[in-house]
Image (cartoon, rainbow, N blue to C red):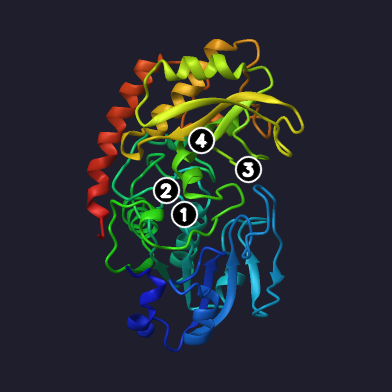
Amino acid sequence: MKLGIDCIDKYLNYFEGKRVGLITNPTGINSKFQSTIDVLKEKANLVSLFSPEHGIRGNIQAGKELKTYIDEKTKCVVHSLYGDTKRPTEEMMNEIDVLCIDIQDVGSRYYTYLYTMSYAMEACKKFGKEFIVFDRPNPINACSYEGNILDINYRSFVGYYPILQRYGLTIGEVACLFNEEYGIGCDLKVIKMEDYDRNKYYDELGLLWVSPSPNIPTVNSAVVYNATCIFEGTNISEGRGTTTPFEVVGAPFIDAYDLASALNSMNLGGVYFRPMYFTPTFSKHKDKVCGGVYLHITNRDDFNTVKTGWTILDTIRRMYPDGFEVNKPYKEGAHCMLELETGGSFLKDMIYSLDEQFELLNKETKEFGALREKYLLY
């Protein structure tokens, strides 16, 4: 197969005589492991770079703000889209005629790169610039989808549009959906991949995995991300500060064997919960021994990511009512992270039983599926 950036020679007319800006990070490479920055520097008039969360070179931890700086290798100015502003300003946009993006997402609504892209698309519409997506695979396949639809009353930079947690689209398809369904209306072009099999996971495509962010080091971490990321909004560790972030969850007050036994007794598809103890080196419960579980994915096709995450949350809450807590909002009057990541207040406020949560999930998954079909490019 060929990635979008591998196909650039067929689309050089998109860039001819134009000043080019690029949103990217270390995942922006072609099949020969050449950086998209270098490819565009050679084949087009690349004048500026735009950095999402984690930085152009991927050297910034989650949540750390960036400032505008000069990239030492290319000498291009790097405009931060994760600092004082998350939206390209008029001053930034005046430097370019076309803005491109080549970046690996992880197939999750929570992931901020989607909204870096959508904000850039809005800026292109506002300031009359073209927007080009070099398409990439969905690493957890682009056919499976699951979740609840985000309530826009809870929109944020970890969930801005009413889509599912696992949306089953490539980043180019997501751009098309955002552009058409949610009124962005920019001049959008997607440089498609060739011979892409949307049923395959990233590690089945013969491509080199580059971590899209420091805590997604492997394809396996991306597979479980939609299950365990919601624990960011609680006092339960999601494995940051360990060698397997998002593949483990736990806390100092949890008995690993009791939790594993309870979860395995539910016979959730495609996953085995192994009891384990771990000590995060940073983030929540730093230097404290945590009891918890490791999620072994035994069958990816049977693994329902969102249902699994909601089940773990419900189980821990019931087993450890005196220990479990929902983290407070970052600022007074704001929604808390659990609400933002689940796209509503129903999990935080325990409005529904687990069975009722699954009914909601099934209904909204089906609803989104009908919309999703309109934007499949492969």
The quadrant of the image that shows the N terminus is: bottom left
Residue at position x 46%, y 54% in the image = 105
Res 184 quadrant in image: bottom left
Height in image: 82 above or below 228? below
Q: Of callouts 4 and 1, which one flags the residue occurring earlier in the amino acid sequence?
A: 1
Residue 328 spot, x, y in % from top left: 66, 27
Do callouts 3 and 1 mark residues in contact (Cβ within 8 Å)? no
* Mark 2 burial class by Cα count in 10 Å: few <14, some 14-19, many 20+: many
Q: Secondary structure under badge 2?
A: loop
* Mark 1 burial class by Cα count in 10 Å: few <14, some 14-19, many 20+: many
Q: Of callouts 3 and 4, which one flags the residue occurring earlier in the amino acid sequence?
A: 3
Task: Residue type at mark 1: give it.
Answer: Asp
Q: How much space separates mark 3 and mark 2, taking CA atoms?
A: 21 Å
Q: Secondary structure under badge 1?
A: loop
Q: Nearer the viewer, residue 298 or 220?
A: 298
List the residue tagged with mark 4.
Answer: 341
Q: Which mark is residue 348?
A: none
Q: Nearer the viewer, residue 232 or 367?
A: 232
Residue 335 seen in the figure: no
Residue 127 spot, x, y in % from top left: 49, 69
List the residue tagged with mark 1.
Answer: 105
List the residue tagged with mark 3.
Answer: 243
Residue 91 spot, x, y in % from top left: 61, 71
Task: Residue type at mark 4: give it.
Answer: Glu
Q: How much space separates mark 4 and mark 2, taking CA atoms?
A: 14 Å
Height in image: 370 above or below 84? above
Do callouts 2 and 1 mark residues in contact (Cβ within 8 Å)? yes
- For the residues carrying marks 4 and 2, which lies nearer the camera in this image? 2
Do callouts 4 and 2 mark residues in contact (Cβ within 8 Å)? no
